[in-house]
């Protein structure tokens, strides 16, 4: 794509008319496409920069190792050197495909804590408290176990209970967690999140249940929905303060599409603020030096970036793990046949099998730490690879901690006027003492967990951080050089009442502009306690209802 495309060379459908244009067919965008097109009079266009999700490696759950470094389905972002992580440049995969990051994620289904959403509402966002968002979580869900007060059935998104298929080493983990003081929790999305248990995942019949499979593909049969792939949005078109359409690059040509009602950005926490800034909406100190004409100054676009970090402790095991099942050729053959014939076995699962939520200090009123247990290890992985089918050549497993509500805040901003240039991402990780102390407390808990009779019986040695890392200073050094993102960036188009501090209001309308909304994880007022895919889908459901309600007004 040229940096300054000739706007006279437009496609044959230039200025095609729609009611709604959705930029991004990710977790929230797929929901919007389905719900908005349910009303037959709505003409809906979806623009997705990536291609089709009909790939074996996307549909097979453990195949996400193949998409982790695949530029055909992944934006493959790199952050700027991060001082809090020892100056390392972080790797941030983001889905560039139908389904967005729900097509390349690890599929763990976690909503967050009720208090997360009550806090959203308390920040000046009416209608976003737990009692208001729970119906949308339930509406989206088809839980394999059935419905109850907290869980839904009949929704598009299938959530599977895979507990009977998980590796037996999970039982040692659960017993160890009980010995360490954590109660057993059979549903982290039920009455309480606290405790240790086994994760439910977004799969169905052994296939990934992405937002594309759950929402978009059923809707693509409708005549009033048009989905364009390989269509990179380059600019929002404005008439005064009113968004009227999108320019996008596809097949070597610049196209224009016009929205009679609304333009909706669902491009995610990186691409939504990037497109706003490219279109003249953002901080003046960023846009003016690049020569971008200001449409509307919005200082918070790209600010307030939040993410979850995790820290691994890796162990060599005395008993078999998934390493022995997945590494040898006969193990690969057996797992492949099991998957092809039965849609079962390790290829139908996530490597994140056990987990939990706990309080690192007794004075806390709710869990502040998430656990991951994976009966597999990849410490010998070559650079630039995520070899899900080639783990370490000896039995190993890992346990990770991830603080639920970090206080560090970063930002992102465009580096040029070329839409093809990735933005500068400054995570500003572990920049508060609070975050550093929580990771230190989490690491100490992992040592406590490993010392229980149930886990110590199966651990041959702790390979990382290793017995030489014992003092607080040594552990802090390990934290800064080994902590990594778990790929949950949010809040770069934050929702809130004050335009100088937030990008959208509680109806997800961009402050100061008309006919423009943002509906994706970038609007989170604060990161939720756990994985972010489920709340992103909830935002899509609630956002769709708001758009449809407003569309019925005179």
Image (spheres, rainbow, N blue to C red):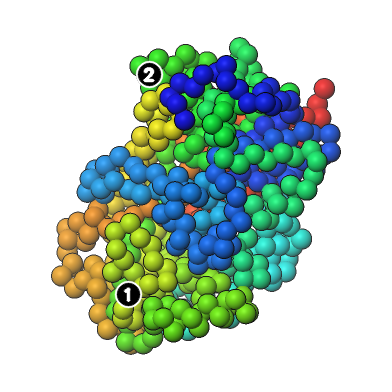
- In the image, is 52 to the left or to the right of 83? right
Residue displayed at 42% across by 43% down: 306
Taking depth in this image into account, of 535 and 156 the one nearest to the observer is 156
| Residue 156 visible to the viewer | yes
Q: Residues within 10 Å of mark 1 (few under 14, many from 20)?
A: many
Reading the image, the residue beneath label 1 is 392
Quadrant location of the C terminus in the rendered image? top right
Residue plotted at (44% across, 53% down): 70
Q: Is residue 383 left or right of residue 233?
A: left
Measure the alpha-carbon separation of dots 1 and 2. 48 Å
Q: Can you give x and y, in whole percent of width and height, for residue 482 in the image? A: 27, 58
Q: Is residue 501 visible?
A: no
Residue 112 is labelled as none
Q: Earlier in the sequence, mark 1 or mark 2?
A: 2
Image mark count: 2
Rendered position, 461 above or below 231:
below
The residue located at (50%, 64%) in the rendering is 63
Judged from the image, the secondary structure of the residue bearing numbered disc 1 is: loop
Callout 1–callout 2 Cβ contact below 8 Å: no
x and y percent of residue 538 in the render? 64, 48
Rendering coords of residue 507 (x, y %): 65, 32
Q: Nearer the viewer, residue 117 or 284?
A: 284
For this rendering, which residue is in front, 271 or 122? 271
Q: Above or below — where is 34 with respect to 279? A: below
Quarter residue 46 falls in: top right
Badge 2 is on which residue? Answer: 290
Q: Is residue 360 above or below residue 509?
A: below
Q: Is residue 241 left or right of residue 152?
A: left
Residue sitting at 79 percent across and 44 percent down?
222
């Amino acid at each position: 794509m040229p940096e300054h495309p000739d706007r006279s060379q437009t496609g044959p459908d230039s200025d095609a008319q729609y009611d709604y244009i959705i930029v991004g067919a990710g977790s929230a965008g797929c929901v919007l496409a389905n719900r908005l097109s349910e009303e037959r009079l709505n003409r809906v266009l979806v623009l997705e920069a990536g291609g089709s999700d009909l790939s074996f490696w996307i549909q097979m759950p453990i195949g996400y190792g193949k998409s982790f470094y695949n530029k055909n389905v992944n934006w493959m972002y790199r952050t700027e050197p991060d001082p809090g992580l020892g100056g390392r440049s972080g790797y941030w995969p983001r889905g560039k495909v139908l389904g967005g990051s729900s097509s390349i994620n690890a599929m763990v289904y976690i909503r967050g804590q009720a208090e997360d959403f009550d806090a959203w509402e308390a920040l000046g966002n009416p209608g976003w408290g737990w009692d208001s968002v729970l119906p949308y979580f339930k509406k989206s869900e088809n839980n394999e176990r059935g419905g109850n007060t907290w869980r839904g059935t009949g929704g598009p998104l299938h959530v599977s209970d895979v507990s009977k298929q998980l590796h037996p080493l999970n039982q040692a983990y659960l017993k160890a967690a009980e010995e360490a003081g954590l109660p057993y929790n059979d549903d982290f999305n039920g009455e309480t999140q606290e405790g240790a248990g086994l994760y439910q995942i977004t799969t169905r019949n052994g296939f990934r249940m992405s937002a594309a499979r759950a929402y978009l593909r059923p809707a693509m049969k409708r005549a009033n929905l048009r989905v364009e792939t390989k269509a990179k949005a380059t600019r929002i078109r404005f008439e005064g303060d009113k968004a009227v359409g999108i320019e996008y690059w596809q097949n070597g040509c610049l196209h224009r599409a016009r929205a009679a009602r609304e333009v909706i950005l669902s491009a995610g926490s990186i691409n939504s603020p990037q497109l706003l800034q490219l279109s003249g909406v953002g901080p003046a100190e960023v846009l003016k030096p690049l020569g971008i004409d200001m449409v509307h100054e919005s200082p918070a676009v790209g600010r307030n970036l939040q993410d979850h970090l995790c820290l691994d402790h890796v162990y060599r095991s005395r008993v078999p793990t998934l390493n022995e099942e997945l590494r040898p050729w006969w193990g690969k053959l057996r797992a492949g046949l099991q998957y092809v014939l039965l849609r079962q076995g390790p290829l139908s699962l996530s490597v994140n099998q056990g987990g939990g939520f706990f309080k690192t200090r007794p004075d806390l009123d709710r869990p502040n730490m998430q656990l991951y247990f994976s009966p597999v290890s990849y410490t010998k992985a070559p650079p630039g690879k995520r070899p899900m089918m080639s783990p370490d050549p000896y039995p190993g497993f890992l346990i990770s901690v991830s603080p639920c509500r970090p206080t560090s805040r970063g930002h992102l901003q465009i580096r040029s006027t070329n839409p093809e240039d990735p933005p500068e991402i400054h995570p500003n990780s572990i920049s508060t003492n609070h975050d550093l102390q929580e990771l230190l407390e989490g690491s100490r808990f992992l040592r406590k967990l490993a010392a229980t009779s149930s886990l110590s019986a199966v651990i041959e040695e702790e390979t990382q951080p290793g017995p030489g890392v014992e003092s607080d200073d040594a552990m802090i050094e390990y934290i800064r050089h080994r902590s990594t993102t778990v790929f949950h960036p949010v809040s770069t188009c934050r929702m809130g009442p004050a335009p100088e501090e937030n990008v959208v209001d509680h109806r997800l309308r961009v402050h100061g502009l008309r006919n423009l909304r943002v509906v994706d994880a970038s609007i989170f007022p604060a990161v939720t306690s756990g994985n972010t895919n489920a709340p992103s889908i909830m935002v899509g459901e609630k956002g769709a209802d708001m758009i449809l309600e407003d569309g019925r007004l005179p």
